[in-house]
Amino acid sequence: MTFKKTAETLPKGAHTLERDYYVNPDILQKEYENLFLNNWICAGRSTELNESGQYKVINMGTESAILLRDEEGNLKAHTNVCRHRGTRICEKETGQFSKSIQCGYHGWTYGLDGELKGAPHMDAVEGFQKTDYPLLSIPVAEWEGFIFINFSDNPQDFDTAFAPLFGRFKDWNIRDLVPMKTINYEVAGNWKLVIQNYCECYHCPILHPDLAAITPYLGGRNDLHEGPFLGGYMDFNEEKESVTASGHFCCPPLKDLKEDDLKRVYYYSIFPNMLLSLHPEYVMYHTVWPDGVDKCKVECTWLFAKDVVESEKHHTQDAVDFWDMTNKQDWHISELSQLGIQSKRYSPAPYSGQESLLAAFDQYYLGQLDKNN
Amino acid sequence: MTFKKTAETLPKGAHTLERDYYVNPDILQKEYENLFLNNWICAGRSTELNESGQYKVINMGTESAILLRDEEGNLKAHTNVCRHRGTRICEKETGQFSKSIQCGYHGWTYGLDGELKGAPHMDAVEGFQKTDYPLLSIPVAEWEGFIFINFSDNPQDFDTAFAPLFGRFKDWNIRDLVPMKTINYEVAGNWKLVIQNYCECYHCPILHPDLAAITPYLGGRNDLHEGPFLGGYMDFNEEKESVTASGHFCCPPLKDLKEDDLKRVYYYSIFPNMLLSLHPEYVMYHTVWPDGVDKCKVECTWLFAKDVVESEKHHTQDAVDFWDMTNKQDWHISELSQLGIQSKRYSPAPYSGQESLLAAFDQYYLGQLDKNN
Amino acid sequence: MTFKKTAETLPKGAHTLERDYYVNPDILQKEYENLFLNNWICAGRSTELNESGQYKVINMGTESAILLRDEEGNLKAHTNVCRHRGTRICEKETGQFSKSIQCGYHGWTYGLDGELKGAPHMDAVEGFQKTDYPLLSIPVAEWEGFIFINFSDNPQDFDTAFAPLFGRFKDWNIRDLVPMKTINYEVAGNWKLVIQNYCECYHCPILHPDLAAITPYLGGRNDLHEGPFLGGYMDFNEEKESVTASGHFCCPPLKDLKEDDLKRVYYYSIFPNMLLSLHPEYVMYHTVWPDGVDKCKVECTWLFAKDVVESEKHHTQDAVDFWDMTNKQDWHISELSQLGIQSKRYSPAPYSGQESLLAAFDQYYLGQLDKNN
């Protein structure tokens, strides 16, 4: 985003990152260890898992989690690795357990709580105790209907980590919204290029003329300037109501929004890999998943009020189409950035005042990358 | 396989291998050097090369061998690398030489014995002697109609190495059997997962219900418990005669088999990459070829008596179909194991008594891997 | 090529290169640094860029250049990396600028001379001077209508480097020739195998019987024996006039050629990646581009007199077809060489007198590879 007063928050001498951060596989390994497998990452929506035993699989790099609703209706996550021979237990992206989780190789069987219940022939092994071999647990948290998991052995407390966001978006009632559409993208660029692209609208006049016609790129303000959560809002043009193909609401605005929030779109990046975009009548979020130094996967979901999704009289597809087009423009320019940055002649250059959030992202990123060294 | 008395042979504290052995490219290189290029590996059947000059090409990692029948009717193997500019001479998997082997680049020509016969214009090069540039020879051995080659510069004596197997399977007359069918598979898993999968039937009730209905997984016994050759037999269920789709003989049993052997299937792994399965009426063998840390190729061949293959009245396809289905089940679970073991949360776990042969395989494997260090 | 007197120029004990030079990625990196990004490389023909603002993109490894005709009609080359966020500016292989070069991300705009003209919002950044952020310049030179660029920060003077070739081919008037056809190839072999293949005709009788029928492989002579430029000529057979499908001229011979040159084809390799083949009635050139240790791309272009290309009465396709067939034969044998050389049993062998230019190429190559160490 670009914002009226961003120059205030741009650190003097702020520069783009060095080439190595976009091309070096050793840095990607460090990113997995210190960022993606050591922070709370968004794993989808609570409403995806309604029934007891319903599950979805979350894959991050070498790791895989089974996220499920247990018999008491709580969310749980287990490492998707059988404790016997290491087999990945769940292969499909989503599914439904009956009362237990069985590995398809030798039939080791776990409860929905991860406890090992059955391990044929292991009783005869000296010293073997079923209680020593549960599925390894992965912490789960929920906020505004979003599920977060943390692959770390010593995860930071979620409530402490997310405290700055608690209550911040209550007027949107995000917890009650439901997904209307999800699109998956593959981007031939480093994951940080996607985040950085999201963090400024300096590029909008050139890359997104249609978007720039809805939200003038100088009309906004940041309200989170540093740390893991960064962002702010942009005002709509006078004749515009929302980010849609028509520029008008594609359904009635969310009911509890204040006057000011009806005239704005809010954009936030939630470290390390979530992007949250709040419109007057819908909420969109992206999650970004590295796939090598020069590739990543992006999942984008549009959330609407339940009655809107169930009705057929609205134009929600207008919001999807507009952002799908804009997403593709962003992924393409990110791919061109990846190609250029790999050059030995690339060198860091100063950020403009319109890019203060990138400077803030880079700073936080560098601190996290080295936090265990 | 799983066996009545295996608990006896399971070393106390036997665990699955560490993650590194399935994901580390440096270990794969060591496996090539110390295992695959330093042991006798099965290269097919003697009957594939009937005529003088007939050849087949065997590729293992970076190496390639031309295996042929020479003018005296002997099997020979030569390195498939022209001594002039290093060109791979034979490209096709199989073929027929006339009297000589000619490189298609500059026409250097070798006898079937590998001696350099023609090297245009080289006479003018000071000190050049044709006798210094034969195709490099690769040792060949034959056992029960199987051809073995050894890429080592100092190969172990074949007769010493294979002595424990000599005469063991004489009642099957394997030398006289001929291939009825060969199927090639690609498996997205480390080669050892395929061997380990073969070495136990603990997984049969879950993964192969049809197979478990033919050979009850607890009805068997190991008779080779350690070293390069591992295996034993499994009894058929009372109403079953063989491993086929029908559960009955798909052709008459092999003529010299003793009573006991008519009621059993024998399974052996022959280090490093051969699997030999002896049924009352046919013999099946697999060869396994690494292709990166997380991929391998598997070739499976079904051998029958010559008159059975030549006749059309038998149901040999029943044996092929049944094992083809079972093979695919095994490759798929091996692929899931590869995915799970790559996790940083995978850790070695105890083997059950049903997996004693895996413990024995791992132990021998580790010893071979480090034998030159 | 093979030549009557080559034995004179073959250094005693000359051997093929060690395996490492064809399979080691570290050596490829050194080749990029010391050879491809540190020498003048052929970037096409001056006539490809006729209009002011017309451009083509040259990609070499991680690097990319925009080659263009500026407003004064001069050739210029700029690094294809925006100085702001490192974005690759030009994506298409060829195109046309109006008066300026604009990055599609944030609209930074450069003159055709590379100077930064517009950088929105950067004026507010303390200490930012547009003059500090031009597109980085890449030296350009022209010879016989060929364009050469040099990615080095300290390029050798072109006139000094190419002095040995100046005037050498003036009778062909290459500067006036125009491209009739370009074909792009991908070769699964190290780039040096393509150069080495070009440097001898010892392989012609076996690999190219049709070519050997036109130019007897022992009928020629080298006239450049060492250094970056290597080659000589081959005589045509008595009944042959040129290298075409028919063996006859496919159009009238070039007008200023001397009697002797009408009976010969000249072949030169121009270090590091250009091959120049001069026929009585046309000129063909290849450029070779590494793409990993075991792959390269080859571009081949046929140049003819302008009036020949504009007329429809000639058989220029005969030259293209003949060499396209021959090219493919050469790429295929180079691919087999790559496969063979990867073997641990490959070892360097003596060159014959017919391969003296390969010995000379290898010697110059090794010197260049280590020149900065």
Image: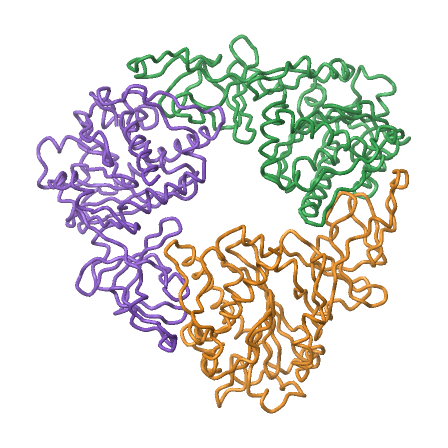
Chain colours: A orange, B green, C purple
Residue A30: quarter of image: bottom right
Locate residue A58, reporting x and y percent.
68, 59
Residue A371: quarter of image: bottom right
A165, A98: nearer the viewer? A165
Locate residue C283, reporting x and y percent.
20, 41
Residue that appears at 73% across and 14% down: B166
Eyeballing the image, is A193 above or below C275? Answer: below
Locate residue C124, reporting x and y percent.
38, 78
Quarter in which the N terminus of chain B is drawn:
top right
Hey, which residue is sitting farthest bottom in the picture? A259
Locate residue A54, reporting x and y percent.
78, 63
Eyeballing the image, is C114 above or below C324? Answer: below
Q: Is residue A311 visible?
A: no
Residue B157: quarter of image: top right
Quarter in which the C terminus of chain B is drawn:
top right
B99, C148: nearer the viewer? C148
Eyeballing the image, is C240 above or below A340? Answer: above
B359, C70: nearer the viewer? B359
Q: Is residue A339 visible?
A: yes
